[in-house]
Image (cartoon, rainbow, N blue to C red):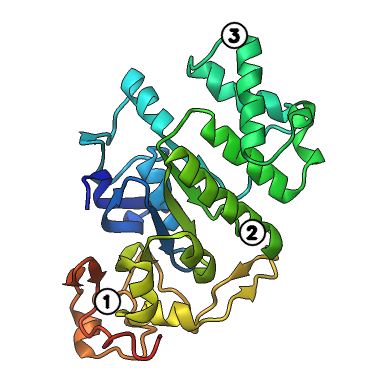
Amino acid sequence: MNEPLLTVENLTKHFEVGRFGKKKYVRAVEGVSFKLYKSETLGVVGESGSGKSTLARLILGLIPITAGKVIYNDLDITGVSGKKEKEIRKDLQMVFQDPYASLNPRIKVGDAIAEPIIYNDIEKNRKKVKEKVNSLLELVGLQNKMYDRYPHEFSGGQRQRIGIARALSLNPKVLICDEAVSALDVSVQAQVLNLFNRLKRELDLTYIFIGHDLSVVKYISNRIMVMYLGETMELAKTDAIFTKTKHPYTKALISAIPMIDPDTNQKRIVLEGDIPNPINPPSGCRFSTRCYMAQDKCRKVHPDLLEIEEGHFVRCHYPLNGGEGNE
């Protein structure tokens, strides 16, 4: 395989909580490492609270890193600032779950897409900026006449296309899609996923695609990383994740039936038992309190993430044998 475009090394984020007494920390992301290769899509899955979105924000420098580093094109971009940061941020962009929240309701969508183009000095001529915005609207399947409309005039799927167009306005190399289709209806999800795949081919993009619905992530990803309570539990090619499942947590995710969350009206994975408190995670395997295979060693000894087959990593003392029927 070619040299990685993006390398994440032992990325860690602890959030301090509580104002009084002994300091406590939420261990949101703990020692996550992976390599992202040019033109691939790396899916990141896990239940709510597994650290997926925090990982995305750490990579983009939106929140400070507790430990670890992020290397892009052989350059350590951890903590970069000034002009260098501005240049790097053009290459690394995010598509958010809720595009409406990231759009100013008082600004026309065309102007919202044009804003990063002007701010980053990509183009200053107003006529050429408008031409570029119109081409971006067409690229994501919207019409030029929509330039002068406001966010509330669009459907959820259309707003997500606007968010994608805005992210593409800086000609990025890597798009991090944080639950980018989870708020959409199933039929609209398929349309947006097909758009992502088309853009990947046409623009030679590289994706980190974050989600909780394994069927969605499976459709778009070349490899999948499974996270639980801030850690990587399993990382492998997409086919291997489903046919050679090694971690009991991955198996549980594959077997789980997505449920509708009454608070958000969105599908999410619901497994038996609650995720442990991230302030005080289990001392052994973090999944040991919910794992049907857990033994004494699992509860006492924290497992390392090991490569048990070429390109297949798992954090488990007793990995499953060939997926145990997950064919």
Query: What is the distance, in whole Å, between disc 2 and disc 1 at their CAs?
Result: 35 Å
Q: Secondary structure at mark 2?
A: helix
Q: Is residue 266 left or right of residue 67?
A: right
Labels 2 and 3 touching (C-beta < 8 A): no
Q: Amino acid at mark 2?
A: Gln
Considering depth in this image, is 191 or 33 the residue closer to the camera? 191
Residues at discs 2 and 1 in contact (Cβ within 8 Å):
no
Q: Quadrant of residue 71?
A: top left
User: What is the quadrant of the C terminus in the image?
Assistant: bottom left
> Residue 64: percent from the left, percent from the top?
35, 40
Instruction: Give whichever of discs 1 and 3 has the lower sequence position.
Output: 3
Q: Work out which residue is located at the far front of the displayed protein and give it.
A: 202
Residue 21, given in percent of the width and then of the height, sits at 35, 55
Q: Residues within 10 Å of mark 3 (few under 14, many from 20)?
A: few
- Alpha-carbon distance for marks 2 and 3? 36 Å
Question: Which residue sits at x=53%, y=35%?
Answer: 167
Q: Residue at x 40, y 86 (%)?
A: 326
First in residue order: circle 2 vs circle 1: 2
Residue 225 visible in the shown view: yes
Judging from the image, what secondary structure is the residue with disc 1 in? loop
Q: Taking 265 as reference, is 110 above or below it?
A: above
Q: Residues within 10 Å of mark 2 (few under 14, many from 20)?
A: some
Look at mark 2 in the image and give the residue it sits on. Answer: 189
Q: Which mark is residue 285?
A: 1
The one of 14 and 190 positioned closer to us in this rendering: 190
Mark 1 or mark 3, whichever is nearer to me: 3
Q: CA distance from mark 1 to mark 3?
A: 57 Å
Judge whether residue 102 can be spotted in this image. Answer: no
Question: To which residue does mark 3 refer?
Answer: 125
Q: Position of residue 193 (x, y in %)?
A: 57, 55
Mark closest to the chain's N terminus, 2 or 3: 3
Residue name at image x 70 percent, y 50 percent: 157
